[in-house]
Amino acid sequence: MFQLSNTPGRTATIDTKEFLFFSGYAYLGVQHVDEFVSLFQQGISKYGWLFPSSRISNTQLDVFAAMEATLTALTHTSDSICFASGFGAGTIASSLFRNHAIAVCPEAHPAINKLQQPSLGFDKWAEKTLHAIHETSFDKTPVLITDAVNPLTSEVNDFDFLQYIESPLIVIVDDSHGIGLLGNKGQGISSLLPRKENIEYIITYSLSKAFSINGGAISCTNKATADAIRTLPDFTASTSLSPALAYTFIKGQSIYAAQRAKLMHNISLLKTFLSAHDGIINDERLPVFVLPEVLDETFFAKHQTIISSFAYPTTQGKKINRAVLNALHTEDDLRMLAQIITGRTITG
């Protein structure tokens, strides 16, 4: 484990030594963009960094409604609700339909997956679930719970199987690692979901991974579901995320777009550098490169480089080695990473 003495960007500092940093989930790197920091400072001046008030108080800050409208437009849904944490948003979403038949993908994030099940894999789970829906009669609309992206394996899950379901269905998707990245405008998994009248989507996500906003949200294609969430104590009695960060999110959309373009260029560049090297797994839409088991954190530390290397979601599992890119990395950074992985000089 590394104890960092600064907030990492393209590099991190350990005991005064600078390391290349290919870990963490600040995908767009906006904390190190001066214009973004300036927006946050403006937000503090206007709203303060905290508004310790219930969301149903008779005194409301307009910035929260504006942020929810921005998220609704981004995800092409009917309504969105902000929360102080992405984990909390996921927990609320997954608890909405306790009396319904529920199928949970075993690989789903713990925020929406409260069951302990053997690993199955998304595709096999989807096949099994599709068969069960076709063969079963339900008293209430069945509910599917899954992730949009598996950041441990660098995979974007394929929801095309939903096209073959004609009966009413509710699908809860955790898009924490897709929102801000997938789609031409960072709209996340909502850009890839089959839109059908019989399917209601509830998309829950952390805002920290791409947007560097300490909070979470739920976006609903059915406004009635969003209205119901706003009556829950989890919403009514809770303090919201920082209003200064909400302001920064709203005003920072062009910054996100610019950083997303840089990140996608970095992904393409590293894939080119590694094209002749076997054993690396990557979906070109994601900044996560899964590495062979032998290329662990100790190996990279010898080259003054930090990768992501830990067991998840519990510490008892096997470590997963990944190089995680962000928008701040330079071509030289990526060339160096490729040279460390391949053991040869990368030119071009």
Image (cartoon, rainbow, N blue to C red):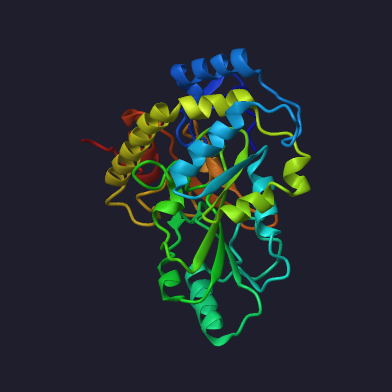
Quarter placement of the C terminus: top left
Badge count: 0
Q: Nearer the viewer, residue 84 or 284?
A: 84
Quarter-wise, where is residue 346 in the image?
top left
Q: Residue furthest left?
A: 348
Residue 328 visible in the displayed image = no
Quarter-wise, where is residue 334 in the image?
top left
Question: Image height check: is 85 above or below 170?
Answer: above
Q: Is residue 70 left or right of residue 81?
A: left
Q: Give residue 168's position: percent from left, percent from top.
A: 53, 72
Which residue is pictured at 67% across the width and 69% down the height? 117
Q: Residue furthest front?
A: 58
Q: Give residue 316's position: percent from left, percent from top.
A: 70, 56
Which residue is pictured at 35% across the width and 30% down the height? 258
Residue 108 visible in the displayed image = yes
Q: Nearer the viewer, residue 31 or 145?
A: 145
Q: Residue furthest top?
A: 45
Q: Give residue 337's position: percent from left, percent from top.
A: 39, 37
Q: Is residue 66 left or right of residue 286?
A: right
Quarter placement of the N terminus: top right
Which residue is pictured at 41% across the width and 42% down the height? 186
Which residue is pictured at 44% across the width and 42% down the height? 74
Q: Is residue 96 left or right of residue 157?
A: right
Q: Give residue 36's position: percent from left, percent from top.
A: 48, 21
Q: Residue furthest bottom?
A: 135
